[in-house]
């Protein structure tokens, strides 16, 4: 179940990212180390993070995730290890909030995409999730909050 979606214009956001193309089943194995590497790099450079971390999925494929792990930053990050400067694009997005564990995100995206289509919009091929409240808040997954952002084609 997602919160009532809304259409929002978002400005371009400067970010620090790690780009990964991995089999879907490897997601849990790579996320923790990737987030840690990202936070270490932006912390060492004193540029962030300035907001919640996110994943920006560039292309959707049933077997592969092609995505960036990222955080917003206050200035351009210098390349460090796998960390590179990036941007979340300025876009008109359909946005909603998913409450609950990460295992429910697939269904939440299905619900948001159905809303987008029913409202007469066309979804772009990418999407991003901002992880507002997660496991760091405690073991109760019902408290997790993930912001869903689906860019809309013009």
Image (spheres, rainbow, N blue to C red):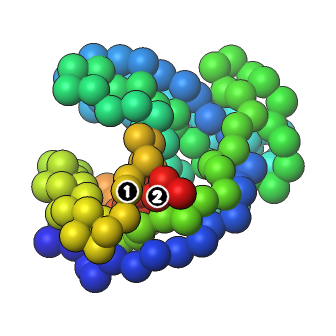
Going by the image, does 62 lie left or right of 123? left
User: Would you call the spot at circle 2 few (<14 residues within 10 Å), some (14-19), or many (20 or more)?
Assistant: some
* Front residue of 51 and 106: 106
Q: Nearer the viewer, residue 44 or 27?
A: 27
The picture places residue 154, in percent across and down from the top left corner, at 53, 57
Q: Quadrant of residue 1?
A: bottom left
The alpha-carbon separation of the residues under discs 1 and 2 comes to: 6 Å
Upstream in sequence: badge 1 or badge 2: 1
The residue nearer to you, when weighing 152 against 47, is 152
In the displayed structure image, the side of residue 72 where residue 27 appears, left or right: left
Q: Position of residue 17 (x, y in %)?
A: 62, 35
Quarter residue 19 falls in = top right
As helix, strand or loop, the secondary structure at mark 2 comes to: loop
The answer to whether residue 145 of the structure is visible from this angle is: no
Instruction: Give the residue number, with chain letter if any, for mark 2.
Output: 152
Determine the residue positioned at 28% across, 82% down. Answer: 4
109 in relation to 126, above or below:
below
Residue 75 can be seen, yes or no: yes
Q: Residue sitting at 19 percent across and 62 percent down? A: 114
- The reply to whether discs 1 and 2 touch (Cβ–Cβ < 8 Å) is yes
Image location (x, y in percent) of residue 80: 75, 22
Is 30 above or below relative to 138?
above
Judge left or right: residue 125 versus residue 41.
left
- Image side of residue 135 versus residue 128, left or right: left
Q: What residue is rendered at 53% in x and 75% in y? A: 8
Element type where label 1 sits in the image: loop
> In the image, which disc is placed on residue 122?
1
From the viewer's side, name the closer residue of 21 and 34.
Answer: 21
């Amino acid at each position: 179940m997602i919160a009532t979606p809304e259409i929002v214009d978002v400005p371009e956001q400067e970010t620090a990212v790690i780009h990964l193309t991995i089999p879907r089943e490897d997601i849990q194995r790579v996320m923790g180390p990737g987030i840690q590497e990202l936070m270490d790099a932006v912390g060492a450079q004193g540029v962030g993070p300035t907001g919640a971390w996110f994943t920006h999925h560039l292309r959707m494929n049933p077997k592969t995730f092609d995505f960036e792990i990222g955080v917003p930053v206050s200035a351009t990050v210098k390349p460090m290890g796998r960390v590179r400067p990036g941007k979340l694009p300025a876009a008109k997005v359909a946005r909603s909030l998913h409450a609950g564990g990460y295992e429910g995100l697939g269904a939440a995206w299905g619900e948001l995409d159905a809303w987008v289509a029913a409202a007469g919009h066309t979804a772009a091929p990418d999407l991003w999730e901002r992880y507002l409240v997660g496991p760091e808040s405690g073991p109760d997954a019902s408290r997790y909050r993930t912001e869903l952002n689906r860019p809309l084609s013009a």
